Image: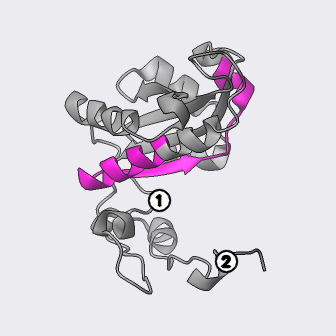
Amino acid sequence: MKKIAETIVPINDLISERWSPRAFDSNHVIEENLIKSLFEAARWAPSCYGDQPWQFILFKKEDTTSWVSVLNCLSVGNQNWAMDTSIIIVICANKNFNHNNEPNRWSHYDTGAAAENICLQATSIGLSTHQMGGFDQEKIRKLSNIPKQFDILSCMAVGKQLDESKLSKVQKDKETQVRSRKPLGDIYFVNEWK
């Protein structure tokens, strides 16, 4: 199923085709080279001083014990659909610069850019992503032994979108909802805040 963004002016197809489904093919396994391509895309995101403050933790469905453990860190609402995805990526940002250990106030911004590169790369290779804020940070920190120097920003589910013909009625109702965004004129000002 494609849900192309309705735009005022043309934008790149990759951006207009990217959206966050909740219905995934539970049998799909992502090839290792495709997983590496997601992280390669993240690696080339821009960052302050080229510092690359991001760090990712990959969970694969094939590793059943770890998979169940990471699912148990998600909110129940997210567990209900994320269990059908192929991988979950925990997205972390280093609070300090790597080159001098001084505070990096741009680390979240830069890590967000890297995460978006993963989303766009996934779209380009026929996969879908859905980023989640509903998770227990301390459970994930403990599960993955994440140092306190890193903020845990989100969890990203990645997989193959479930074919529309296989959607349940409930899934179809959710997946076919119209995409919406604020009007273009509401998200930017010229020269000063108004």
* Mark 2 Cα-neighbour bin, 10 Å: few <14, some 14–19, many ≥20: few
Of residues 81 and 108, the one nearer the viewer is 108
Answer left or right for 71 relative to 65: right
* Residue 72 appears in the picture as rendered: yes
Q: Position of residue 104 (x, y in %)?
A: 67, 30
- Select label 1 or label 2 by which is in front: 2
Quadrant of res 92: top right
Look at mark 2 in the image and give the residue it sits on. 189
Q: Compared with residue 166, is residue 158 higher up or lower down, i.e. above or below?
A: above
Q: Compared with residue 97, is residue 114 higher up or lower down, i.e. above or below?
A: below
Magenta residue check for 125 = yes
Going 39% across and 44% down the picture, which residue do you hit?
118
Q: Position of residue 80 (x, y in %)?
A: 56, 47
Looking at the rendering, in which quadrant would you find the C terminus? bottom right
Report the label total: 2
Looking at the rendering, in which quadrant would you find the N terminus? bottom left
Q: Which mark is residue 20?
A: 1
**Residue span colored magenta:** 114-141
Q: Amino acid at mark 1?
A: Ser
Q: Position of residue 142 (x, y in %)?
A: 67, 16
* Mark 1 Cα-neighbour bin, 10 Å: few <14, some 14–19, many ≥20: some
Q: Position of residue 2 (x, y in %)?
A: 32, 71
Going 57% across and 76% down the picture, which residue do you hit?
181
Of residues 66 and 180, the one nearer the viewer is 180
Q: Amino acid at mark 2?
A: Phe
Q: Compared with residue 132, is residue 192 higher up or lower down, i.e. above or below?
A: below
* Residue 160 appears in the picture as rendered: no
Q: Compared with residue 67, is residue 81 higher up or lower down, i.e. above or below?
A: below
Going 29% across and 69% down the picture, which residue do you hit?
13
**Residue furthest to the front:** 191
- Tell me the element at label 1: loop
Closer to the chain start, of discs 1 and 2, is 1
